[in-house]
Amino acid sequence: MEAIAQQVGHGAIVPGRPGDLGRPRLTHLGEHLGVRLWLAHLDEDLSADEAALLCEQELQRAARHHREEDRRRRRVARWALRIVLAQTLGLEPATLRFQTDPQGKPHLAGSGRAACHFNLSHAQDLALIGVCAQAPVGVDLEILAPVADLAGVSSLVFTPAERDELARQAGAYDTAFLRGWTRKEACLKAVGTGLGLDPAGVEVGLSTQDREVRLHLPSHGARAIVALRSLPASGMDGTQTPWVAAVARLVGTTGAWPEVGGVGSC
């Protein structure tokens, strides 16, 4: 539950089949809502040549983690992101430069930003990468596991209707909760607010149905419309780890939705 507390071009890899782009293995999950999705496996560390593709800030951020497995996962996830973005744009991975907005969401710096929107989510030894040429995107991935204090956490992050929906689940409470949470996180990441916008005020539902979600940012008098989909995870990749995930794409805004500005670079 650590994630609760806190995209590529056409290649030779077949959707739904493991493909080797070096290490880690990257699996293309196809296109959903106009977003190309890839699953990265983070269980094998980078070679020296692969690590050399990362910038100094990426290496420093990874080094801040206390556990070596978390440092490895951070390094490999950023490497995988560079690989898929470089394939999308036809660039060398080491030449990519990133900016981070005030909410902490990374963007490509320079001309690549308008041509390629992306988002990344990771949980344990898996990472999900989404890439879209048309609009900002958000993805979220969670490993299926028992949820501690499910009722208490639900009261903080779910709407009354979602809590009622959770209560009607036939024993599959953890799966339903995590499905709902990934849907919520993906929407909030797509609009760039993250948890700066109260998740309990965003209605996404706990089902697997596609949905258009409307979000309101009272401080700016602005509204956003997001297309949302839960991923049919079963059989989509070669891992035995059970996971749930969601993808969201911004499809429209009204009012003065805040501009995203870079505050850092790498």
Image (cartoon, rainbow, N blue to C red):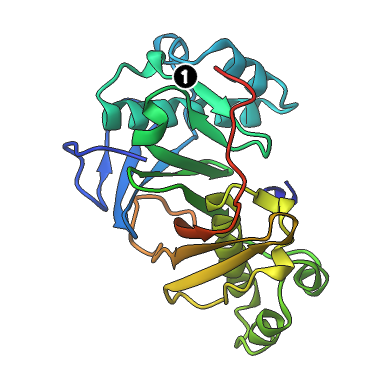
> Which residue is the extreme one toward the front?
255
Q: In the depicted view, which residue is nearer to us: 46 or 103?
A: 103
Rendered image quadrant of residue 112: top left
**Who is closer to the viewer here, 234 or 183?**
183
**Could you say where residue 226 lies in the image, as x and y percent from the top left?**
48, 62
Residue pictured at 65% horizontal, 77% vertical = 173
Residue 42 vertical placement versus 212 (above, below): above
Count the numbered circles shown.
1
Work out whether 255 lies above or below 89.
Answer: below
Q: Residue visible at 51% across and 24% down?
A: 98
Residue at disc 1, secondary structure: loop
Q: Nearer the viewer, residue 211 or 56?
A: 211
The residue indicated by pointer 1 is 97
Q: Residue at x 58, y 11 (%)?
A: 56
Q: Position of residue 22 (x, y in %)?
A: 31, 25
The answer to whether residue 229 is seen in the rendering is yes
Give the quarter of the figure containing the C terminus.
top right
